[in-house]
Amino acid sequence: MDRTRLPINSSEEKNQPLQSDSAASHAIAEAVTGLAGPFLIIAQNSLSAEKIFSELKFFLKKSENVVYLPDWETLIYDSFSPHDDIISNRLEVLNKIQE
């Protein structure tokens, strides 16, 4: 069974067994509800990040505060820049986080 570590308060962590595909997102939503943010969640890859993003928007009451910072979709050695839409979206998210 997969496990995740969730901070309960600043000095405590709790191991929580995961029961389903969306259990991690639900556990994250439960852990951060009522706490002052912001919170950063790092996913294994872009697909996982998009899944967690959509699930947190479902589980959290203030889903407008959930933002997704998309991957650049380029590598260091690529000779091309990310698509303009990706750059624009990232700037929009970074601006929203700053507010």
Image (tube, rainbow, N blue to C red):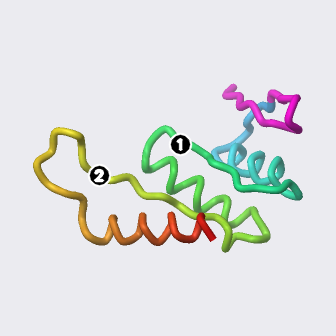
Find out whether residue 99 is within the magenta segment: no
Q: Position of residue 46 (x, y in %)?
A: 43, 49
The reply to whether callout 1 and callout 2 are in contact (CB within 8 Å) is no
- Judging depth in this view, the residue of 88 and 26 nearest the camera is 88
For label 2, the SS is loop
Amino acid type indicated by mark 2: Glu
- Seen in the picture, residue 81 relative to 21 is either above or below; the reply is below
Provide residue 96's location: percent of width, then percent of height.
Answer: 57, 70
Q: Give the labeled residue for mark 1.
A: 43
Magenta residues? 1-15
Residue nearest the observer in this picture, 34 or 28: 34
Labelled disc at residue 73: 2
Secondary element under disc 1, as helix, strand or loop, is loop
Residue at horizontal 80 percent and vertical 32 percent from the top: 16
- Please identify the quadrant where the N terminus is shown: top right
As drawn, is 72 to the left or to the right of 91? left
For label 1, the crowd category at 10 Å Cα-Cα, with few meaning under 14, some 14 to 19 and many 20 or more, is few
Looking at the image, residue 36 sits to the left or right of residue 38; the answer is right
Indicate yes or no whether the magenta region holds residue 6: yes
Task: Give the distance between the C-alpha atoms of the residues marked 1 and 2, in whole angstroms.
Answer: 15 Å
Q: Does 65 appear above or below 80?
A: below
Q: Is residue 61 above or below residue 37?
A: below
Q: Is residue 54 above or below residue 15?
A: below
Question: Which residue type does callout 1 highlight?
Answer: Ala
Q: Residue at x 77, y 31 (%)?
A: 17
Ranked by sequence position, the earlier of labels 1 and 2 is 1
Residue drawn where x is 86% and y is 54% of the image: 35
Relative image position of residue 21 (x, y in whole percent): 63, 45
Residue 19 badge: none
